[in-house]
Amino acid sequence: MKKTATLKVDNREYKLPVVIGTEKEKGIDISKLRAESGYITLDPGYTNTGSCESSITYTDGEKGILRYRGIPIDELAQKSDFIEVADLLIWGSLPTKVMRKRFTDLLTNNALLHESLKHHFEGFPFDSHPMAMLSAMVNALSCYHPVLAMPHSSSEIEKAAAILISKIRTITAFSYKMSRGEPFIYPKSEFSYAENLLHMMFSLPHEPYEVHPEVKRAVDLILILHADHEQNCSTSTVRMVASSGANLFASISAGIAALWGHLHGGANQAAIEMLEDIHSGSIDVKQYIKMAKDKKSSFRLMGFGHRVYKNYDPRAKILKKLSKNVFSVLKHKDPLLDIALELEDIALSDPYFIERKLYPNVDFYSGLIYRAIGVPKNMFPVFFAIGRLPGWIAHWKEATENNRLQLARPRQIYVGHAKQNYVPISKRSTKKS
């Protein structure tokens, strides 16, 4: 017999099914509540609402757990690479050698942009934000691959995934080159995924450029750590847009737009700008801590705390160690790293932060690593989008396959005017209501 929860309202009782996940997380199915009672639940920000059942990623914020398809993130960070993780997320299991080679070949064969698509860059102002260009260009890809915009078979989904995952690097590099007035650099088939991204961004025709192995590994690792994080804002956007029947490219384009916000994909840029403010001398670390603890202040300490994690973000632990390795091999001394470490030491020993479980998150260190590599701040969320792309594709696939597609349509509690009559303009009050 299935377990149920009982809701009592207006002297009536309603039996609601209890749903239990693989890791024993519990939910109450309210999908029929309005039809049976006339009531809906109100949950601003969906902080306590499950929008779907998913088998892709598991998080436990209290214990600091993140797993892709059941595999702990620290194991993937240590033993895997970004392309294997992409395969894992999209298809549900680690690829065989044959599967891996086939997908790698597809990525290599789809790295170039259609030559006429390149002309789209000329229509953007040189100082356009790269996230705006990325969202527009990904949407435009659907015009060049109309058959794959709504993939149905496994081979079509694999081809569409390869097109997006491969070309997003080229779009990123070309937007960077356009902003600097430099010539576009084409990918090389012998380079790895991360190496090609860095090569296309930082190479110049008249100068040799070699990607340091530790830098290549650092970028690959950051992409792995960003590859999915269950029902975050951008992923939920992808699934919501997909629920309307929108194609894969349009859904991903919408996800990119959602990621752009400074509270989501732009958070690492905001963290760097905070550290820059401290370094400029306009305000010191202790003042920042004091402002963060002031209930009357709207100030927010960027890079600390997470909507999910009430423990140390497992991704941040990996990135903290990685940042030291990158700085060491590049012989790069950044005063912002020293400030970041000082902030972390204070926060981890201050009762205010300990009680509220405000630990450093993935954004705290990723921006420092990108800065050391030479990636400009406005490109930070673009790199985030590259990493998150396999997760978005996996969620689009999960949401649309097996006739599971259901139009997302949240309800609301209306709090505006009650019914009122139309007033002709000659009789309207001049006072603002």
Image (cartoon, rainbow, N blue to C red):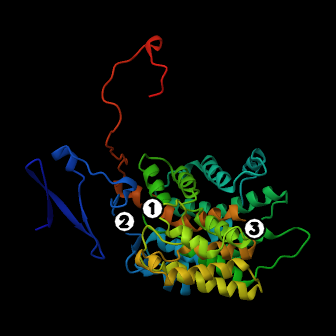
Label 3 secondary element: loop
Q: Is residue 27 left or right of residue 91?
A: left
**Going by the picture, which residue comes out furthest to the top?**
426
Which amino acid does the dot numbered 1 rest on?
His
Residue 412: in sight, yes or no? yes
* Residue topped by disc 1: 395
**Going by the picture, which residue comes out furthest to the left?**
11
Nearest to N terminus: mark 3 or mark 2: 2
Q: Quadrant of residue 56?
A: bottom left
Which amino acid does the dot numbered 3 rest on?
Pro
Q: Is residue 36 left or right of residue 374?
A: left
| Residue nearer the viewer, 95 or 304 | 304
Label 2 secondary element: loop
The local crowd at label 3, few if under 14, some if 14 to 19, many if 20 or more residues have their Cα within 10 Å, is many
Q: Is residue 12 left or right of residue 204?
A: left
- Asked whether the residues under the numbered discs 1 and 2 touch, taking CB atoms below 8 Å apart as contact, a structural biologist would say yes
Which of pointers 3 and 1 indicates the residue nearer the eye?
A: 1
Q: Give the position of the N terminus as an image quadrant.
A: bottom left
In whole angstroms, how far apart are the C-alphas of marks 3 and 2? 35 Å
The local crowd at label 2, few if under 14, some if 14 to 19, many if 20 or more residues have their Cα within 10 Å, is some
| Residue nearer the viewer, 282 or 71 | 282
Note whether 285 is above or below 162 in the view shown: below
Tell me where residue 430 appears, x and y as whole percent: 49, 20
Which amino acid does the dot numbered 2 rest on?
Ser
In whole angstroms, how far apart are the C-alphas of marks 3 and 1? 28 Å
Mark linked to residue 187: 3
Mark linked to residue 54: 2
Q: Residue at x 46, y 62 (%)?
A: 232
